[in-house]
Amino acid sequence: MNPRIPKRYTLMIACTGRSPITLSFRPALVLTALAVVAAIPTIGLGKVFYNYTQRNISLTEENSALAEQAKEILEQVEVLEAQIGDLQQRAGMEDAADPPEQGQGDRPRSLLLPQSPRPGEPGLQSEANSFRGGLSPAVPPELMLQAAQAQIPSLLQQLQQRVQPALEKTLVREEARPHGMPLKGQGVAISSEFGLRRNPFGGGYELHQGLDFTAAYGTPIYATAPGRVVTAGWSQGGYGYHVIVDHGYGYRTLYAHMTKVEVTEGTKIERDRLVGYLGSTGRSSGPHLHYGVYYNGQPIDPKDHLD
């Protein structure tokens, strides 16, 4: 048999010398109120736990995004560093690992990373502990992103202030280096090499200070590098009509035995500029071009400059 819960209770409180106090209440309402009061802490804890979970999820997603962004920037930094290293090597600069000169504004890369913490700082190893080995603390994504972003201006500044000027000078110097053939077209051949050879005008040997090219009479002759014409005309030393071009950086070229000269002294010319025509003037045994290359006043083998 199921017990029945009365619909209403009446409670009388009697005091000596006073009228009794009567309280009437419904048990169902009281039980409901007690259940609600008991449920309030549970609901509050659930809400706190939910908010904490959502916050952790949000922070995890944010950290993942920051870490991915930092990774992409670091990859770009590595590519930029590699390109700068290639340019430094191309420019003939010192080792890329050397520290930048004072006043350039470049900072060593180590300064862009977190510094050693103060002794006792929570959550991080002290500098003394780091020298004893062990695991290094993980770098927070926002700090890694900040460090990655901080390296780009330094690298760009290094590129603009140090590498680019040195590379430009290198390109100008390389442009001044004689390169290529002074004669174009078919039927061009080398008839006499650079170095010791038999004297074609008598007995014994002589030091031939250039290359002799044979081709059809009147074949155009072109400068093999930009420069300034320092000599253009007749030579009393056996070269006949000839041209000498100063290319700077210690380089000069000689074009001799021409039938006609097409430039004048003091003229600035570009590579492949027409300087004259092949002939047989001066000390010559037949139509040919004597082509000489000089570096710091000394004759060098033009073959090293033909390709």
Image (spheres, rainbow, N blue to C red):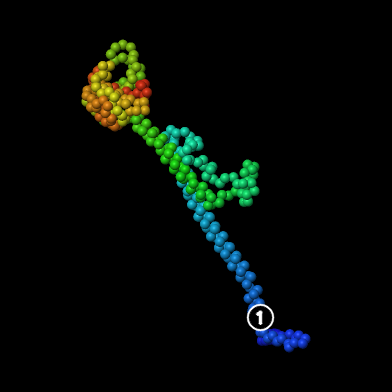
Where's the N terminus, which quadrant? bottom right
Q: Can you see residue 133?
A: no
Say left or right for 23 vs 176: right
Q: Residues within 10 Å of mark 1 (few under 14, many from 20)?
A: few
Q: Nearer the viewer, residue 160 or 223?
A: 160
Residue occupying the point 49% across, 46% down: 150
The amino acid marked with disc number 1 is Val
Q: Nearer the viewer, residue 127 or 54?
A: 127
Residue occupying the point 36% across, 24% down: 295
Say left or right for 273 vs 67: left
The picture quadrant where one finds residue 273 is top left
Say left or right for 71 vs 35: left
Number of labels in the image equals 1
Check disc 1 and report the residue beneath it. Answer: 30
Q: Residue furthest front?
A: 17
Where's the C terminus, which quadrant? top left
Q: Residue furthest bottom?
A: 19
**Vertical placement of residue 68 versus 91, above or below:** below
Q: Point out residue 271 in the picture as x, y percentages from the top left corner.
A: 30, 31
Q: Point out residue 20 in the picture as x, y percentages from the top left corner.
A: 73, 87
Q: Residue furthest right?
A: 16
Residue occupying the point 71% across, 86% down: 21
Residue occupying the point 65% across, 82% down: 28
The picture quadrant where one finds residue 283 is top left
Q: Secondary structure at mark 1?
A: helix
Q: Nearer the viewer, residue 180 or 243?
A: 243
Q: Point out residue 149 in the picture as x, y percentages from the top left corner.
A: 48, 48
Q: Can you see residue 131?
A: yes
**Vertical placement of residue 43 versus 21, above or below:** above
Q: Point out residue 37 in the picture as x, y percentages from the top left corner.
A: 64, 75
The picture quadrant where one finds residue 241 is top left
